[in-house]
Image (cartoon, rainbow, N blue to C red):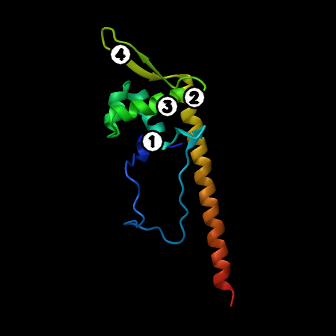
Amino acid sequence: MPDIESLGFQGKKPSRFSCHPQPGYVIKGRIWVEKDGELYMGWGRVMLLERIEKLGSIAEAARSMKLSYSNAWLWVEAMNRLAPSPLVKKTVGGVGGGRTSLTEEGRKVINEYKELRSRFQEFLKQERRILESCHLEQDRTP
């Protein structure tokens, strides 16, 4: 699976009119996971978790995504509350200051979400092929 860094973070919604449109039909979709009607996991949250792991700080991870610290903290708090066990743990101060890292559960959730997203992308590709084949058949009928 691709690394989250290589895919880039889009803070804004994509334009409905692409500067570089793909030929033919394109089926697009997004996938996220909710628990009890509350957002638990999505692409942005996965990115935040990966950057927390890489940078060791919620503040640094938020800054790298151009996300406010308060929003990042709210996301982390919600994920920790909704997960079966915490995804992020904080270690308080000391000589070098505190550190934030992912738990095993956090790493597991990232991998599960990436697998889910990959299956969803494959589903969209399959549906596009079906749509195109239906339209090709219609174009051939007299």
- Disc 2 element: loop
Q: Position of residue 56 (x, y in %)?
A: 38, 24
Residue beneath label 2, please?
Answer: 83
Q: CA distance from mark 1 to mark 2?
A: 16 Å
Give the mark toward the camera: 3 or 4.
3
Would residue 83 appear left or right of 8 to someone viewing this image?
A: right
**Residue holding disc 3:** 78
Circle 1 packing at 10 Å, graded few (<14), some (14-19), many (20+), is: some
Estimate the x, y position of residue 53 in percent, counting from the top left.
Answer: 43, 27
* Callout 4 touching callout 1 (CB < 8 Å): no
Find numbered disc 1 in the image and state the secondary structure of the residue it sits on.
Answer: helix
Q: Amino acid at mark 3?
A: Ala
Residue type highlighted by circle 2: Ala
For image coordinates 60% across by 59% down, the residue present is 125
Residue shown at the point (56%, 48%) measured from the top left: 31
Q: Which mark is residue 44?
A: 1
Residue 64 placement: quadrant: top left
The nearer-to-camera label among 3 and 2 is 3
Quick one: label 1 or label 2, which is nearer the N terminus?
Answer: 1
Which residue is more in the foreground, 13 or 131? 13
Tell me the number on the disc at residue 98.
4
Name the outermost residue toward the bottom: 142
Q: CA distance from mark 3 to mark 4?
A: 21 Å
Mark-to-mark CA distance, 2 and 4:
23 Å
Q: From mark 4 to mark 1, how far is it between C-alphas?
A: 24 Å
